[in-house]
Image (cartoon, rainbow, N blue to C red):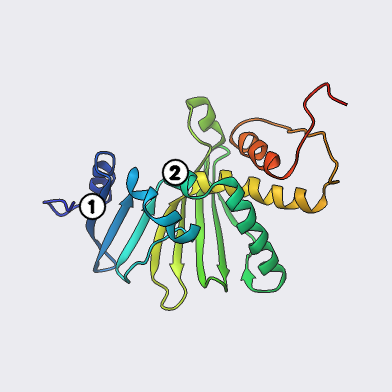
Amino acid sequence: MRSQQEPNLLTVGRLARSEAHVVGWLNAWGNPVSVTVISGWTAGRLTEARDCGMMPAMTASQILVIGRTEVERLLPMERCIELMAETLAALSRGEAVNPLRAIVRLPKGPNMLGLMPAALSTPPAFGAKLISVFPENRAAGLESHQGFVALFEAEHGHPVALVDASAVTAIRTAAVSAVATRALANPDAGDLALLGSGTQARTHLTAMLAVLRPQPPGEP
């Protein structure tokens, strides 16, 4: 649906909680930009967001916004492991650019802001993850890592998607660990130890079980 009043990001976000598909018009960079918020059943009809490329066919003036639930649905761990294996191979061939992250320490407390840009030749795309790290959020029941991934198309540099970074971080980090484990672990390895707890422990368990078959406790 289209809002009757001129919407802003807050309007779009509020409507997205009650509507499956919201199109708002924003005055961004001096031009109207169509923002499509994917929610609920709409995400399931995107054919895994163009085969897990995370975006449908978009015009130059549209930005796709994908929330956490949709990232988890569209990017299952097994699929992400294979994508990370392909991406790491591309990086080793010089077909990707992955500079060191930039970290800004905020004035008070342990909080930080991280910027992680990258570019890929095939499929041609570039973007950056912008994420806040607030370790004390756990005491309030909130994620310590929050932010978004901004994705651009490589022909003209148009922004095409904003993706929830908490879900991407949780899945991708564990998927890269699984790629390394699959390549380096003894094929007969039967013991698995996870040090720590929280989001990364949970996703790493899922990732490890996708590439290993650990023995249940007590079995030889």
> Looking at the image, is mark 2 or mark 1 nearer the viewer?
2
Judge by depth and name the residue closer to the eye, 219 or 58. Answer: 219
Residue 39 visible at all: no
Amino acid beneath label 2:
Arg
Q: CA distance from mark 2 to mark 1?
A: 21 Å
Q: Of helix, strand and loop, which one carries label 1?
A: loop
Residue at the left extreme, as displayed: 4
Residue at the bottom extreme, as displayed: 155
Judge by depth and name the residue closer to the eye, 122 or 132. Answer: 122
Do callouts 2 and 1 mark residues in contact (Cβ within 8 Å)?
Answer: no
Residue 69 visible at all: yes
Disc number placed over residue 8 in the picture, else none: 1
Q: Residue at x 25, y 51 (%)?
A: 22
Question: Is residue 194 shown above or below 43?
Answer: above
Question: Is residue 120 shown above or below 213?
Answer: below
Q: Report the residue marked by disc 2.
A: 68
Q: Residue at x 79, y 54 (%)?
A: 183
